[in-house]
Amino acid sequence: MNTTRILAAALVACSTLAAQAQTGPVRFAGIMELSGSGATPGTNFNNGVKLAVKEINAAGGILGRPIDYQPVDTQTNPGVAKALAQKAVDDGSYVVLGPVHSGSMLVTMAETRRAEVTNFTGGEAASITQQGNPYVFRSSFTQLTSMPKVARYIKDTVKARSVAVMYTNNDYGKGGHDAMLKALDALGVKVAVDISTDPQQVDFSAAVLKVRQSDADALFLYTLEEESARALRELRKQGYTKPVIGETTAVSQKTIELAGDAANGMLGHVGLTADAPQARIKAFDERFLREYKYKSEHNGMKGYISVYVVKAITERIGKFDSKALSEALHGAKISAAQHPGVLMDLSFDAHGDLDRESFLVRVEQGRQLVIGTLPAVSAK
C-alpha cells in the first residue's frame, strides 16, 4: 500500500516537473563583457538585451513563457568566457547571447556548438562565421560586408586616391584591417601607411605623426571606442585636417562622447545608429533613454534586436528547440512590420551572417547625422 502511494506521488512529481519545463521561464544566458577593456560594448549590448526581455515579458513572454535572462561577466577574458559558456549550456540555456568581443566569441562558440545551442554575437570579425558553425548568428554585419561599402565611399565620395590605415591589433581589428586592405586594393586606392595600435593604447602621438607624414588623402580609423576617442583628440591636437573615415566603433555614440569636439566632422559607415530617421528606431531610442538615462548606440541595438529575432523565429517554429531554432534561422527573413522589435527588415544567410540596410553618417555637434542609406546587399 505504502509502495503504491510512493509510486503515485513520484508520478505526480514527475508530471509537475514536466509541466513546469513546458510552461515555466525559458532561460537565456548572457556571456557579457561587463568589466575590463570590453566593458563599454558589453554593457551596452547587455542593456539592450535587458530592455527587450522586460518588454517581451510584460507582453506575455514567448509562446506564453517568460524569459529568465541571466547575464554573467567575462571580464573581457576569453578563458573566463569559455568557462561561463560551458556552464550556460550545461544549465540548459535555450539561447546564449554574447560574447560581444570577437576574440572571446571565437573561443566560446565551440561550447555552444557542442551543446547545439543557438548563439548570438555582436562580434564583427569575419572569421566567426567562416568556420562552419551552424549555431552562430550575428546581430551585426560581418567585416566582409561592411568594408567594401566603406572602401567604395572613400573612393567615390571622399575622392581619396591614397589612405592611411590605423587599426587595433586584436581579432576584431585585424579582421577589419585585412578586409579593408583587400577592398581598397580592388578599387585601386593606395594604402600610404599601415599603422597597428594596441588595445587600450593611451598615447597616439606617434601614430598620428605617421599619418601626417604619409601625406595620404584621408585616414581610415578602425579602433575600439576608447582608443578611437584618444586618436581623434590627438589628430585634433596635431592639426590634422584631412577626412577621417571610420566604421561602427570609431563613430559610435560612446566615441563621440569621449572625444568631444574632436569627433565633429568625422565620417563613417554604421550598420545601426539610434539617430537613423526611422520611426521604429526613434521609438527604441526613446525607450532606451528612459530606461538607462543615456543614449543607446549600436551595441545596445544589437542586443535588443537579438532577443526579438529569437522571439520571432521561436514563434514561427512553435516550440522551444534550440537546434530547430538554428535551422530555421538559416535563410530566414524577418519583417519589421510584423515584428517591430527587430527594428529593420533583416535576413540571415547560410553562414549566420545578417543582411539589412546600413547608414553613412557624419558627426556634427556631438551626434551622428545620417547622410545616406545603403540598401541591403541582397536587395541589389
Image: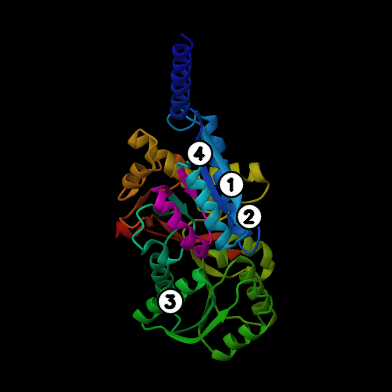
User: How far from the left and from the top, in percent, is residue 148?
Assistant: 39, 71
- State whether residue 95 is above or below residue 62: below
- Which of the two marks, 3 or 2, is nearer to us in this view? 2
**What residue would you read off at disc 4?**
27
* Residue at the disc numbered 2: 34
Identify the residue position indicated by label 1 in the image. 71
Q: Is residue 150 rendered to the left or right of residue 30?
A: left
Which residue appears farthest toward the top when viewing the image?
A: 1
* Relative vertical location of residue 195 with respect to residue 366 in this rendering, above or below: below
Q: Return the x and y of residue 63 as percentages of the image width and height.
A: 42, 30
> Label 2 amino acid?
Leu
Q: Which badge, 3 or 2, is on the more N-terminal residue?
A: 2
Disc 2 and disc 1 in contact, CB within 8 angstroms: yes
What range is drawn magenta here? 95-118
Image quadrant occupied by the C terminus: bottom left
The residue at the point 39 percent across, 42 percent down is: 322
Disc number for residue 221:
none
Q: Earlier in the sequence, mark 1 or mark 4?
A: 4
Q: Judge whether residue 139 can be spotted in this image.
A: no
